[in-house]
Amino acid sequence: MPSIERIEQIVMRSTESVPNEVQLLRDELLQRWHEWPVDTTQDFCTYAKSQIETLSKNMRGIARRALRDIQAGVSMEADMEARRATLQRQSARRMEGETQRCFDTVNRNEHGVVYLGSARLQSGTPFYEHSRELGREVCQLLGSTSWSGAGPGLMEAPLIGALEAGGHTAGVKILLESDQSFFEQNINPALQPENVAECRYFAPRKVGLVEAAMRDRLEDRTAIIVLPGGFGTIDEWSEYVVLKQLGKLGTNHPVPILLMNYEGFFDPLIEFLYQSCIERGTIREDELKLFDLCRDNFTALEILAETYDIPPDKRPYLGRVHPNVTLRAASPDEHSEAAHA
């Protein structure tokens, strides 16, 4: 049944062009409607029809036609509400099923390193090649499954790198409409279809990618690595940070979150956090320790090695990956000093 407010809107719409005599009765009935006991609605309908008989003979037909219009409008609204409720129930069931498929996919492929990044930056671009190298070196260092959103660009690059290192890859993909195919419709070649959970809703996909990075056991080696990207990447990064901030990440052991600041890509974001958020008190400066800002792959690999107590002789990237001075970006400490200068 539509709400009282919605019924009143239907009544007003159905009687907006009737004569004044009928409108006066309408207004009187609407006032009475608010005072009428809820459990005797049918009696009110009988009362309303009896009041129509008090109108002049010429007005009764107009009032009855208006009443039929109101009844048709209420029936249509009730039908639409029923359809919406059915769709909501179906959506809830579908999201539940997609979430379960994500969990099943993670259980089959094990927790590991989740890569977030732009779908638009293709092979041959500097960021793609940096990401590919990172995926290769992280796989050799940690030996964990490499996960992504299963799209192209910087979601693909680290997985290609992981495969080059003999690693295992998996993904959680969002299915988009056909007119959005410029984003990430095709499963990238770094993944086997059986290792990918496909979702029509974003919520299960996000839950799946969070689950993929969790550390159920102390020996699990996982991480969240955020590569350059746009709205989607920043959205997912901030969600991970907020979950970690609130203690809602759902992991039994700490999970590092690395923000890859290639060529200072995220410098404006860090500057915003300092000069707007910290200065105005919307976040605390120590909350920036929830993630690590990495200016190059060497820095990221060192953080992961230290996190998981990997000794120098077990760090294969040493001597092969070096700090890249061309990717120099200010550290959080340097940003803090500049912001307080």
Image (cartoon, helix red, strand yellow):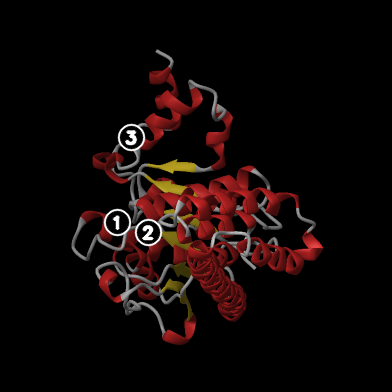
Which mark is nearer the camera, 1 or 3?
Answer: 3
Question: Disc 2, disc 1: CB below 8 Å?
Answer: yes
Residue pointed to by mark 2: 134
Which mark is nearer the camera, 3 or 2?
Answer: 3
Query: Farthest residue toward the top?
Result: 341
User: In this image, 160 relative to 72: left or right?
Assistant: left
User: Which secondary structure lies at badge 3?
Assistant: helix
| Upstream in sequence: badge 1 or badge 3 | 1
Q: CA distance from mark 2 to mark 1?
A: 6 Å
Q: Amino acid at mark 2?
A: Leu
Q: Amino acid at mark 1?
A: His
Name the one closer to the observer, 253 or 231.
231
Q: CA distance from mark 1 to mark 3?
A: 20 Å
What residue is at 38 percent from the left and 66 percent from the top? Answer: 136
Q: CA distance from mark 3 to mark 2?
A: 23 Å
Residue pointed to by mark 1: 130
